[in-house]
Image (cartoon, rainbow, N blue to C red):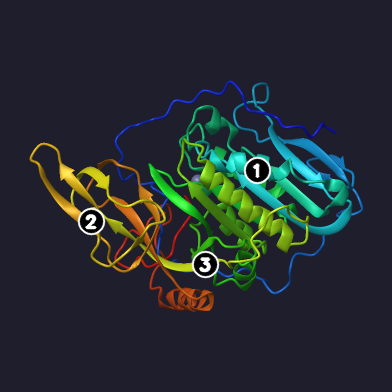
Amino acid sequence: MIPRQLVLLACLTFTTPFAHATELADEDDIPVSRLAEPQPESKADPQPEPAGDGRDSLMLLGEEVQAGEFLTLYWKPVQSFQSIDTPVPVLIAHGKQPGPRLCLTAAIHGDELNGIEMVRRLMYQLEPANMRGTVIGIPIVNLDGFRRASRYLADRRDLNRHFPGSPNGSAADRIGHSLFSDVIRQCQFLVDLHTGSQQRVNLPQIRGNLKDEMVFDFSRHFGGITVLHGVGAKGTLRRAANDAGIPAVTMEAGGPHQLDESAVDAGVKSLETLLQNLAIQDSKRFWSSPQPVFYQSDWVRANQGGILMSTVKLGDKVREGQVLGSVIDPVSNTGSAILAPFNGRILGMAVNQVVQTGFATHHVGVETAAEKVQEEAIEQDLSVKEPVPPGDCVADNADAGNSVSDC
Ligand SMILES: [Zn+2]
């Protein structure tokens, strides 16, 4: 058992790439639209209480965790070769009383730092002696990418497209399979923490497949946070977890390569509310109100390349036709304005940067009743003609509606 004192991450240096933003093929930030969604085989039954939970000890990663104990265990993905592989820390707070088992994963993309800090703040306020259920937190899933300040694995693959993985596939498939079978299958609820990517920032928000009744219910446990519908691209952790019958959402907050105090604080408050609502632990602060705010949303794209300068801020309310920013060709001094397509709120946006034509610049959402968001999600699903290729998490085709994927 380790002492539960504050452990500061020190002596970490990052190289922050400020390369000009381009729309990469794997730009996977942005809402893909209406994927035909295979439904999980059985979604009616909540996860059974796994043997060994609650007052009993918990077997995880080959170790036994006693009720009322806080432990750090290690998950060992075989990434390069055994002599130099570094085990990934997994924090476990196993409550004295029975209750739900909640998992938190962060930094599947190694350059997304806000979630790492959220997991730390949440895990080290837990009191297993007074807790009901179990919280399992993995602060840095992609330790290899984190060291290189990179979103990707060493082979440039995006780990969040390789779940549930395969024991015989690519390196990413094997890592995905290892995490999924060793840890994720033990979870009864999952929150996967992310930020925007490709120099985009997001207002703290929950994304989930709201067509799935279990996910819809789960998404309403987070207090007054923004909630968006998104099926999740194939291979994402949350989609694989959903398909395995585990209610899972992603939480997006802020942007990559930065630690944003307000985003972290809002995310932690939302997770504290979740602890309260799942009756795992009474939180010192939680949102009894307002309730989650559901949005329908769309990305606005630049109609020309050049230097993007926004005139709005994250969270601003905007009116239809309002100038959100402009893109200017620095040589010819010609430019064009980016206009709000409807009244709404800025839920995500690109930071000022050089962009190419078609770059998604502003994510505008319209507040909508939760049930209506769910209804529309189901209707979209029925109207899908053919699946959209995964890999882009901004709305990226003519059909692109309000579906969002993970960043
Ligand atoms: Zn991410």
Q: Position of residue 235 (x, y in %)?
A: 53, 53
User: Eyeballing the image, is 190 above or below 148?
Assistant: below
Residue at label 2? 338
Q: Label 2, secondary structure: give it.
A: strand
Seen from the viewer's position, the closer of residues 256 and 276 is 276
Which residue is drawn at the image coordinates 38% and 55% (left, top)? 394
Quadrant showing the N terminus: top right
Is the C-beta of the residue carrying label 2 under 8 Å from the nearest atom of ligand 1?
A: no
Amino acid found under the numbered disc labelled 3: Val
Q: Label 1, secondary structure: give it.
A: helix
Amino acid found under the numbered disc labelled 2: Ile
Mark 2 to mark 3 CA distance (whole Å): 26 Å
**Which of label 1 and label 3 is nearer to you?**
3
Residue at label 3? 293
User: Are discs 2 and 3 less than 8 Å apart at CB?
Assistant: no
Q: Position of residue 218 (x, y in %)?
A: 64, 65
Is the C-beta of the residue carrying label 3 under 8 Å from the nearest atom of ligand 1?
A: no
Q: Position of residue 286 (x, y in %)?
A: 67, 57
Of label 2 and label 1, which has the lower sequence position? 1
Amino acid found under the numbered disc labelled 1: Val
Mark 2: few/some/many CA within 10 Å (<14, 14-19, 20+): many
Residue at label 1? 119
Left or right: 262 as drawn, with respect to 121: left
